[in-house]
Image (tube, rainbow, N blue to C red):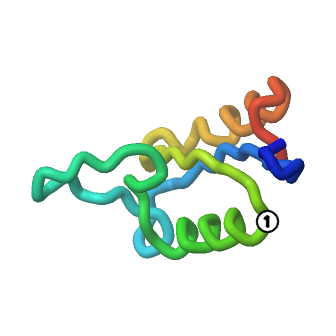
Amino acid sequence: MDSDGNVIYSEICVGLKDAPFFMVKNDSGGTAWTGNDRFYGFNVDIIRALSAKLNFRYELYAVSEQDSATVPDRVVRELVDGVSML
């Protein structure tokens, strides 16, 4: 809960890098992007908007195509362990 007594959920969101939906910002220009600021795209915009509207925090992380075969296993493991929720 926050200081106003509002429930704040914390979610972990997995994204498969796929333009224009979920992309990683380039570090060119000397900007070292960190956290959720590293990502952009349609799906990221939707998650940001939902987070603001529904008052929850989230953490994004990306997987590459080669790792995508393990994503279902990772998601199921996080659900079982109580790390993530649907």
Instruction: Give the amino acid type for the residue marked by disc 1 in the picture.
Output: Leu
Between 41 and 4, the one lying in front of the other is 4
Residue drawn at the location 37% of the way across and 44% of the way down: 34
Which residue is located at x 79 percent, y 65 percent? 54
Q: Quadrant of residue 44?
A: bottom right
Toward the front, the furthest residue is 3
Pointer 1: residues within 10 angstroms few (<14), some, or many (20+)? few
Residue 81, by quadrant, is top right
Say what secondary structure mark 1 lies in. Answer: helix
| Coordinates of residue 67 in the picture (x, y in percent) | 48, 39
As drawn, 46 above or below 17:
below
2 sits left or right of 29 in the view: right
Number of disc labels: 1
Judge by depth and name the residue closer to the eye, 47 or 21: 47
Q: Residue at x 41, y 70 (%)?
A: 19
Q: Along the line of sight, which residue is nearer the eye, 19 or 68?
A: 19
Query: Going by the picture, which residue comes out furthest to the left?
Result: 29
Q: Tell me the residue that label 1 is attached to.
A: 54
Q: Where in the figure is residue 29, as x and y percent of width and height?
A: 11, 58
